[in-house]
Image: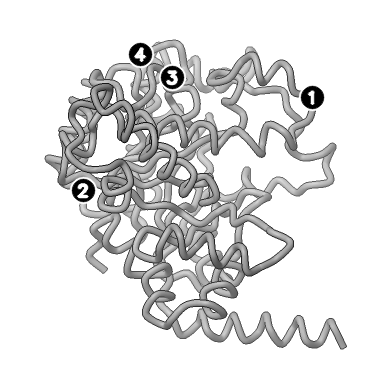
Amino acid sequence: MVFLVYNAMAQTSQDALGETTVVDTDVHLTVHPEDLAQYIDEPHKTHVSNTTYGTPFPSSGWDQWMGGKIDDNWSTFTSTEEIDQFCEDFNVDHPIINTFDPLGKFPQDKLANALMRGYNDYVIDNILDESEHKALIALATQEPDKAAEELDRLGDEDQFVGAYVGTTGSHPPLGDPQYDIMYKAAEDNDLPIAFHGNAEDFMFEFPRQNQALNKFLQVHTLAHTWSQELTLNSLITEGVPEKFPGLNFVFLESGIGWVPYTMHRLNKEYSIRRNEAPLLEKSPEEYIRESCYFASQPLGEPNDPKHMNSLIEMVGAENLMYASDYPHWDFDHPSGVDKHLRSHFSAEQRQQVLYDTPIEAFKLNI
């Protein structure tokens, strides 16, 4: 009986999603090094494609796959056909695609810039020219002027709807004034910045903690959230939204539990130490609610589902967007988010999360 009730609930959710336009704000394309190498000039081309001595993509050494118990769908998600099948299976109408690998971790500036251009050219040729899908411009942040040049180079490509910046491993934190040239180019090209954390790169952002912990469960719990909290803190206190009022900021793959805490903690600190954030003319919470958007994945799993409803309500439908994080092993099916939306929110609020808010955040013309 329980199985039948569960199936009925799942079918109801699927039927409801089938009647709703859904934007998925975080879909990860896999680009294998040997394919990427075709879009990179020497000397970096050999570096990327040389499997004898390994690729330039450092590994944390953590066992993400639990000795093979978790399927690695990531390595096979490489084509428009697979993206189309995913959309059909998940009732997703508009996926926003990124190439995921955070470029801020590379110590070699020139290599990072070559990878940045290579990723973007690969996406144009193999995804955008083959479909009507939308994608994010990959950015390397080591030399912000080069990131600005890449935004200007690709800003007229209609299917690029934002820029993708890895938060784990970028140094200094991403509110630092050295990045202003990058944010100015993003604002000039009317492209939001999407920030994305990464568990493997925890070793670069938090090396002492990475060495002290002995379970990937611990790292995976902390990495994305710490990186995003650091980034939001830096952006707000350094006055980035005040300097670039036309720029939207999107936070991907860190859930939403950290958002109310960070917002309210910044309010408290700012009320006491305003001279340390001299560019701000409003409270941190006002800037966050006006210019920042948060993807739902990974949705938390409180023992009491009402607590998740309260959390969604605190963040607000006008700042919350659905994301799957497909094809990663911890992706969220839209029915999981929709269960909370349909049980607790109005039809208008549900449409905001699944469609209207991502339209606003990414300024989509769909």
Mark 4, Cα crowd under 10 Å, few <14 / some 14-19 / many 20+, is some
Numbered mark located on residue 157 in the image: 2
Q: Residue at x 53, y 77 (%)?
A: 344
Q: Which of the two discs, 3 and 2, labels the residue nearer the N terminus? A: 3
- Residue on which disc 3 sits: 45
- Residue on which disc 4 sits: 110
In the displayed structure, does residue 209 sit left or right of residue 95? right
Disc 2, SS: loop
Q: Position of residue 277 (x, y in %)?
A: 25, 27
In the displayed structure, does residue 115 sit left or right of residue 202? left
Whole-Å distance between the Cαs marked 2 and 4?
A: 24 Å
Mark 1, Cα crowd under 10 Å, few <14 / some 14-19 / many 20+, is few
Q: Are marks 1 and 4 in contact (CB under 8 Å)?
A: no
Q: Amino acid at mark 3?
A: Lys
Q: Position of residue 357 (x, y in %)?
A: 33, 64
Numbered mark located on residue 253 in the image: none
Disc 3, SS: helix
Whole-Å distance between the Cαs marked 3 and 2?
A: 25 Å
Whole-Å distance between the Cαs marked 3 and 1?
A: 35 Å
